[in-house]
Amino acid sequence: MSTNTELEPNQAILDRVTSRRHRQHVEQAIVAWLLRAAALISILTTIGIVIILVAQSAGFFAEVSPWDFLTGTQWTPLLKPQQFGVLSLVGGTLLVAAIAGIVSLTLGLGAAIFLSEYAPEKLRRVLKPILEVLAGIPTVVYGYFALTFITPILQDVFGSDRVIVFNALSAGLVMGLMIMPMVSTLSEDAMVAVPRSLRDAAYALGATRFEVATKVVIPAALSGIVASFILAVSRAVGETMIVKIAAGATPNLTLNPLESIQAMTAYIVQVSLGETPQGSLEYKTIFAVGLLLFAMTLVMNIVGRWVISRFRQQYN
């Protein structure tokens, strides 16, 4: 009788354990399927975008030589005579992205060094979220900030006769501020991952904090820093509203940042919101430009991933 009494609680415990394991198995299966579905949707979306770009661009390249498109310097598809040299758009895009890259690398790396090596833990917990707020500001706000605040300052510094209202420099400077949180956050994470033992060894040899940061931490975290810079620049290449509002709409192959330019994304917006008939050669240009822009950002992201995997430091 006592044996049966002891077996009943044990059986109840076994039933509860079995039920819990079954429930966990079902939950894990549901989560796994949801993750697979999310990954599949992402892949299918990317494939769909590529198919649309290629299919629409094929109609454009059936009438325009790809060589003329990639090597020409005159871009006037909406005017007569029509010219389809995309280099002026590519040049404007890369000019703004280069300015943004210089600004973001300078300020972002400086902020990352301060947060990683100099700031106390309490101050770091406060400053890092504040810095990351810059990434959440709408880009249209950045665009009007460049147009109404940065451009007048540039006109006061360089002269209003040299700096026109729409210019690449103001757009590049503000875009650099926008992508700076990406550089600072990823670089700071890479620096924090450097083992403390390397810092202690450098301090034991008499190195100053600045020497430790520049000669020990940065070289050890170089792959993460370079990757953050490449990813940030690829983000700048695909930016739309800042260059649309502040950089102008003049296809211009120039290295002078004080002149007006037109970026690839700004042209796509211009045609998409205009009165260009769908299916026309002029309308198909946005898909050809979009395909080239997709290829540029894809290459930059691949290079960033390669840098991370190739130069990543392994610590035990």
Image (spheres, grey):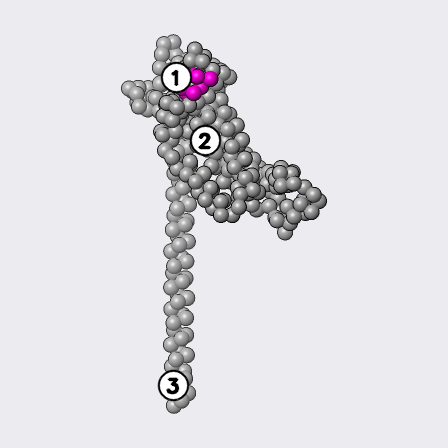
- Cβ–Cβ below 8 Å for labels 1 and 2? no
Task: Determine the image quadrant of residue 267.
Answer: top left
Picture disc at residue 5: 3
Query: In the current view of this chain or complex, which residue is farthest to the right?
Result: 205
Residue 26 relative to residue 197: left or right: left
Characterize the local packing of mark 3: few (<14), some (14-19) or many (20 or more) Cα atoms within 10 angstroms: few
Nearest to the observer: residue 61 or residue 150: 150
Under circle 3, the secondary element is helix
Under circle 2, the secondary element is helix
What is the three-letter code of the residue carrying label 1? Val
How far from the left and from the top, in percent, is residue 129? 44, 42
Q: Magenta segment range?
A: 151-157
Residue in view at x 45 percent, y 38 percent: 131
Q: How far apart are labels 1 and 2 at the CA level? A: 20 Å
Mark closest to the chain's N terminus, 3 or 1: 3
Residue 197 relative to residue 104: left or right: right
Task: Determine the image quadrant of residue 264.
Answer: top left
How far from the left and from the top, in percent, is residue 262? 41, 19
Task: Determine the image quadrant of residue 279.
Answer: top left
What is the three-letter code of the residue carrying label 2? Leu
Characterize the local packing of mark 2: few (<14), some (14-19) or many (20 or more) Cα atoms within 10 angstroms: many
Picture disc at residue 165: 1
Quadrant of the image containing the N terminus: bottom left
Q: Which residue is mark 2?
A: 177
Tell me if I can see residue 219 in this picture.
Answer: no
Residue in view at x 49 percent, y 16 percent: 256
Tell me if I can see residue 119 in this picture.
Answer: yes
Nearest to the observer: residue 158 or residue 68: 158
Mark closest to the chain's N terminus, 3 or 2: 3
